[in-house]
Image (tube, grey):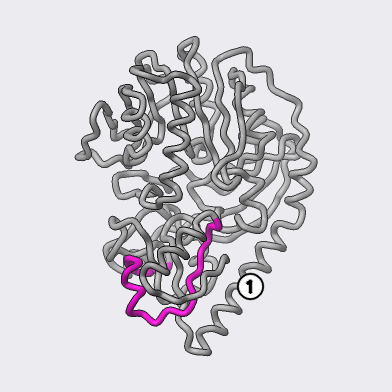
């Protein structure tokens, strides 16, 4: 890919080659050998000089297959659940979403739809090939398939699309399709990871193969407005890690983007990333020589990215709150995932975290378990 996915500009340049990483970091394996043989893909990032959008020019959609094995649910975390509940309350209260229809594209296992429909008394329809077909949620229909551009849905009051656009090779297709069929007064809520955070000091592990795009404020605005939506509200959320926009179908004139500040912040990204990887390897190697035991908390996308970027044998333990991951193995490195309670008998001395938003939650959980290990960001 050489054309910007947000503004269609051809003025792009190479940003960083991050090597290879597991193609599907949300898929667990039943044995270590299979996990270590997981398919890898290349992360070769370019940046648009006109809107600041970053995208993986080496992305190959043929490598990806989202099915029921794909599990990227974060709702086992009280911190994330509180965020999702707050979002559901805000949307329902702001737009009076009572007794209507709420559609979600990329609904995962249906956690957010379950919350917002129960709160609003609405019906819900969710589209996602990774949904659990056997799961039953009152007043919610889960479709085990992609939402496809041009696919008709009955008139809805709210359409939610969270953390989907960054996975699409042609995000404009789904937006243009929605614009053509959107009910006149319907609200559309789009949410993506914030590139400003990802490329900052605390976000260097959010570069994963399923993410084709890394949206800045300018590039997200450019894309949704270019596709015929008017922005009625926008902001950052979840410790500034997410961009969100609330839009209605409208004229959608594309703004003139000024990505200067974002482009300046990207200038030394490749060097900062390499320094961080080298420092992490050195610190883990030193701790191992001293006989100290290090655990990584979080078997999600960032945890998998971190483990595959640094020395995978330097970390012995990986824990996660999601019980569906326990006893299974991470792609690329083959680490077995264990429950947090298993740390109590491990003599662990340091727990690493890849997302600062969970630091307080993890520290308090360790205290409840009687584990006196230091908690460090990577």
Q: Secondary structure at mark 1?
A: helix
Q: Is residue 345 magenta?
A: yes
Identify the residue at the far top of this view: 184
Q: Position of residue 35 (x, y in %)?
A: 35, 64
Q: Where is residue 315 drawn, in percent x and y?
A: 46, 75
Which residue, given by chain and number where applicable, does mark 1 sit on?
A: 278
Question: Hey, which quadrant is residue 140 in on the image?
Answer: top left
Q: Quadrant of the C terminus?
A: bottom right
The magenta-colored residue range is 333-356
Position in image of residue 273 (x %, y %) = 66, 62
Q: Residue at x 69, y 34 (%)?
A: 218
Q: Residue furthest bottom?
A: 290
Q: Please tell me how crowded label 1 is: few (under 14), some (14-19), or many (20+) other residues with Cα within 10 Å.
A: some
Residue 51 is left or right of residue 24, and the answer is right
Residue 376 percent across, percent down from the top left: 55, 69
Q: Is residue 310 left or right of residue 54?
A: left
What residue is rendered at 38% in x and 25% in y? 103
Please check the rendered image and state whether residue 92 is part of the magenta-colored stretch, yes or no. Answer: no
Q: Is residue 328 above or below residue 252?
A: below
Instruction: Give the side of residue 311 with respect to residue 232, left or right.
Output: left
Residue 199 relative to residue 335: left or right: right
Residue at 34%, 76% in the rendered image: 344
Count of numbered badges drawn on the protein: 1
Q: Going 37% across and 61% down the picture, which residue do you hit? A: 320
For the residue pair 244 and 106, the one nearer the viewer reads as: 244
Q: Quadrant of the N terminus?
A: top right
Residue 334, placed above or below residue 61: below
Q: Quadrant of residue 139?
A: top left
| Residue 37 in sight from this viewpoint | no
Q: Is residue 136 visible?
A: yes
């Amino acid at each position: 890919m050489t054309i910007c996915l947000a503004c269609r500009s051809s003025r792009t340049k190479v940003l960083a080659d991050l090597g290879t990483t597991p193609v599907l970091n949300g898929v667990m394996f039943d044995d270590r050998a299979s996990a270590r043989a997981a398919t890898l893909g290349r992360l070769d990032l370019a940046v648009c000089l006109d809107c600041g959008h970053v995208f993986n020019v080496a992305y190959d959609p043929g490598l990806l297959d989202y099915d029921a094995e794909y599990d990227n649910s974060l709702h086992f975390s009280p911190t994330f659940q509180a965020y999702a509940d707050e979002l559901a309350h805000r949307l329902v209260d702001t737009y009076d979403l009572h007794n209507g229809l709420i559609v979600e594209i990329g609904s995962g296992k249906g956690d957010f739809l379950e919350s917002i429909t129960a709160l609003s008394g609405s019906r819900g329809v969710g589209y996602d090939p990774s949904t659990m077909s056997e799961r039953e949620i009152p007043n919610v229909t889960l479709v085990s398939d992609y939402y496809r551009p041009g696919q008709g849905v009955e008139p809805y009051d709210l359409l939610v699309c969270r953390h989907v656009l960054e996975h699409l090779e042609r995000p404009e297709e789904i937006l243009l399709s929605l614009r053509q069929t959107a009910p006149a007064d319907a609200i559309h809520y789009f949410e993506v990871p914030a590139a400003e955070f990802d490329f900052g000091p605390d976000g260097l592990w959010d570069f994963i193969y399923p993410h084709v795009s890394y949206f800045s404020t300018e590039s997200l605005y450019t894309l949704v407005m270019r596709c015929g939506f008017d922005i009625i509200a926008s902001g950052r959320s979840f410790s500034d890690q997410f961009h969100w926009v609330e839009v209605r179908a409208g004229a959608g004139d594309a703004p003139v983007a000024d990505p200067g500040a974002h482009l300046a912040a990207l200038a030394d990204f490749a060097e900062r990333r390499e320094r961080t990887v080298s420092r992490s390897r050195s610190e883990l190697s030193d701790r191992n020589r001293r006989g100290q035991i290090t655990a990584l908390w979080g078997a999600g996308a960032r945890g998998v990215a971190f483990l595959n970027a640094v020395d995978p044998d330097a970390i012995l333990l990986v824990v996660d709150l999601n019980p569906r991951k326990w006893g299974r193995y991470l792609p690329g490195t083959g680490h077995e995932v264990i429950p947090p309670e298993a740390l109590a008998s491990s003599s662990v001395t340091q727990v690493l975290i890849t997302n600062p938003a969970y630091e307080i939650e993890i520290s308090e959980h360790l205290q409840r378990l009687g584990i006196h290990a230091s908690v460090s960001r990577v």
